[in-house]
Amino acid sequence: MAMSEFEKNKRKLARDYQKILQDAEALISSLPGELDDKAKEAKEKLLDTLDQVKEQAKDNYDAVEDKVQEQVQKTDKLVRDYPYHAAGISMGVGLLFGLLLKRGR
């Protein structure tokens, strides 16, 4: 089965996010081992903040995904309950876009 555009974007976002996290962790681990106390404290705070950001991003992503899936299900039910209305609205929107595009030339 072909992957939906939503799934493609979801996977790309996850890959991009993982790359950012890997780069941040590489930056942190590249700091020299012999640091003074303030630098060690800053490094620990950065690691803690990075962990918090990971959790918040995952929670936000999951919440948005749940909302999107809920809206998709509602739309699907509405279209199934009123197929002629949905077809009419789709035709009207298509006609409107067609007129706007034709007028723009």
Image (spheres, helix red, strand yellow):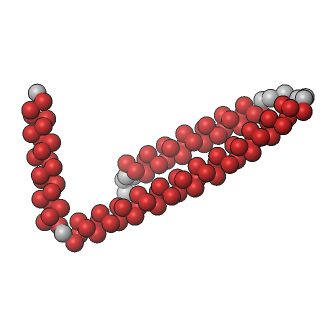
Residue 24, given in percent of the width and then of the height, sits at 68, 35
Q: Nearer the viewer, residue 42 or 90?
A: 42
Residue 16 in view here: yes
Question: Which residue in the rendered view is the most extreme toward the front?
Answer: 38
Question: Which residue in the rendered view is the most extreme toward the bottom?
Answer: 81
Q: Kindly identify the residue that appears in the image at 65 percent across and 40 percent down.
A: 21
Q: Quadrant of the C terminus?
A: top left
Q: Quadrant of the N terminus?
A: bottom left
Residue 34, given in percent of the width and then of the height, sits at 90, 29
Q: Kindly identify the residue that appears in the image at 70 percent across and 47 percent down.
A: 51
Left or right: residue 67 versus residue 99 is right
What is the total number of numbered labels drawn onto the structure image? 0
Residue 33 in view here: no
Left or right: residue 54 versus residue 47 is left
In this rendering, the answer to whether 27 lies above or below 64 is: above
Left or right: residue 70 versus residue 78 is right
In this rendering, the answer to whether 104 lies above or below 66 is: above
Q: Kindly identify the residue that appears in the image at 41 percent across and 61 percent down.
A: 69
Residue 9, given in percent of the width and then of the height, sits at 44, 45
Q: Nearer the viewer, residue 94 or 37?
A: 37
Q: Kindly identify the residue that appears in the image at 15 percent across and 57 percent down.
A: 89
Left or right: residue 51 versus residue 78 is right
In this rendering, the answer to whether 73 lies above or below 103 is: below
Examine the image and state in which quarter residue 88 appears.
bottom left
Residue 66, given in percent of the width and then of the height, sits at 46, 61
